Image (spheres, rainbow, N blue to C red):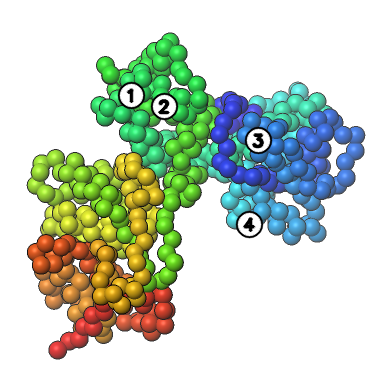
Amino acid sequence: MVSRFATMVGPSSASGRREVRIAVVGDGATGKSTLIAAMASESFPKSVPPVLPPTRLPRNLFPDSVPLTLIDTPSSLAKQGTRNEELKLADTVVLTYACDEPVSFERVTTYWLPELHKLEVKAPVIVVGCKLDLRDENQLVSLESLTTHIMKQFTEVVTCVECSAATLYQVPQVFYFAQKAVLHPVDPLFDYERHALTDRCVRALRRIFVLCDHDMDGALNDEELNEFQVRCFNAPLQQFEVANIKTIVEQKVPEGVNSIGLTFPGFIYVHNLFLKKGRTETLWAVLRKFEYDNDLKLRDDFLPVPSKQASDQSVELTSEAVEFLNGIFRLLDTDKDRYLRPAEVDKLFDIAPESPWNDAPYKDAAEKTDMGYISLNGFLSQWALMTLLDPKRSLANLIYIGYNGNPAEALRVTRRRSVDRKKQTTERNVFQCYVFGSKHAGKSALMYSLLGRPFSNNYTPTTVEQYAANVIELKGVTRKILILREIPEDGLLQFLSNQDCLAACDVAVFVYDR
């Protein structure tokens, strides 16, 4: 067996899947049906039909307790359509060749893997050599030498293994690896080109490290390391185990251990070690204990975003969340100049999957200095805009950067605008103003003026909606956030026909060139 990492089987935490669907494909007579029948019956079948019906394996077969459905596929050209449909539905693909037929192995790279590309099959692939007991021992070639080039050329191939249905040798391993490739995928964790953890994986581990570093001294002491172990694996570390971990890390990454304990480089090294040993399930157990999904984002069910009952309601940050953000700003503003540098904002989000403000519509939506520094007003306005447009993303990023209050109390749904108008009063803190006007009328200039930017004679047509958000003081005391939303002229008719879009408007500004 050759894997992208040497594989170790062990208990793990599954990803919440109810079933894994495995399609078995390959040339005719390579042993597809026999492999499935041997797995299902735990014995070598004397005869099998040309194509087996879907075969369901019990959930207690492997540690993750997820049932497997094995799909046998026809090899004939006449039934190619049926096979292709099954491949598109598969969670993972087992691609077979016969160990006693070198031509069938060549077909793996010359036909089957290119065919999967052509069909745009995104599932991970396990290359399996069947009939190992029939291979001519005088022509024995190591599996590693045969498959190394496959795994370099086709990154979707996560494991290569040889088996024998006649002797049941490594038959269960075939389907364990197939299941594991789905439940504990390598791709989100490992960058094959850089041969290192992905950026998103490092960011997730950095957040976990920060959460576990209770005294915030930049290292996990023995007690913190033990708490991490208990939380993730329900078992404490013995003192000699802690000492062994530190010794191994210190030998390989000297900066990974200091006088206090395990530093972040050491923490990363330990998790990288899990991957190199093939223990993706161990790393996923850690990530899932901290509520990450397979995209290395917080799970949707961990984000209790309040739902609007009507289109003229909006979502805002609560006073508790705003106070938390005020504290974060003060903490990051180490030189006390009341501005955050771009690097300081990036540092804030280096424990999130990505910085949410690097792209439209947030990138240029807040007040900044010529150097790109953002004030507290700009900082809070960015959060208000993100909460208005994408409450789930806003809540997730609050949690990423350290909000440890009740997530359900970070956001609130405002009263309906129609009710506010009747009562002539409102408790909302964020107001949305739509900016309409013809081309060249000065809509963008008006937007920029809210952000304190100087007027420019250079004209750039607006082709997509853009936003500007800032804090407005009313009567010198009350502070509200105003969000301007520029509506491009080209999309005006479609926009005006959408009643839900119009319902979110507090006030409209019509700009004309006098």
Label 1: which residue? 220
Q: Which comes before the other along the chain, label 2 or label 1?
A: 1
Locate the C terminus by quadrant.
bottom left
Residue contact at pointers 4 and 3, CB within 8 angstroms:
no
Q: CA distance from mark 1 to mark 4?
A: 48 Å
- What percent of the width, then of the height, locates residue 24? 72, 44
- What percent of the width, then of the height, locates residue 80? 75, 57
| Residue 357 falls left or right of residue 305 | left
Q: Amino acid at mark 4?
A: Leu
**Helix, strand, or loop for circle 2?**
helix
Q: CA distance from mark 4 to mark 3?
A: 31 Å
The residue sitting at 26% across, 44% down in the picture is 348
Locate the N terminus by quadrant.
top right
- What percent of the width, then of the height, locates residue 33? 81, 42
The residue sitting at 35% across, 82% down in the picture is 492
Q: How many marks?
A: 4
Q: CA distance from mark 2 to mark 3?
A: 25 Å
Kindly identify which numbered label has been placed on residue 119: 4
**Helix, strand, or loop for circle 4?**
loop
Kindly identify which numbered label has been placed on residue 228: 2
Q: Which comes before the other along the chain, label 2 or label 4?
A: 4
Residue contact at pointers 2 and 1, CB within 8 angstroms:
yes
Residue 463 seen: no
Q: Is residue 95 above or below residue 286?
A: below
Q: Which comes before the other along the chain, label 1 or label 4?
A: 4
Q: Is residue 238 above or below residue 335?
A: above
Kindly identify which numbered label has been placed on residue 65: 3
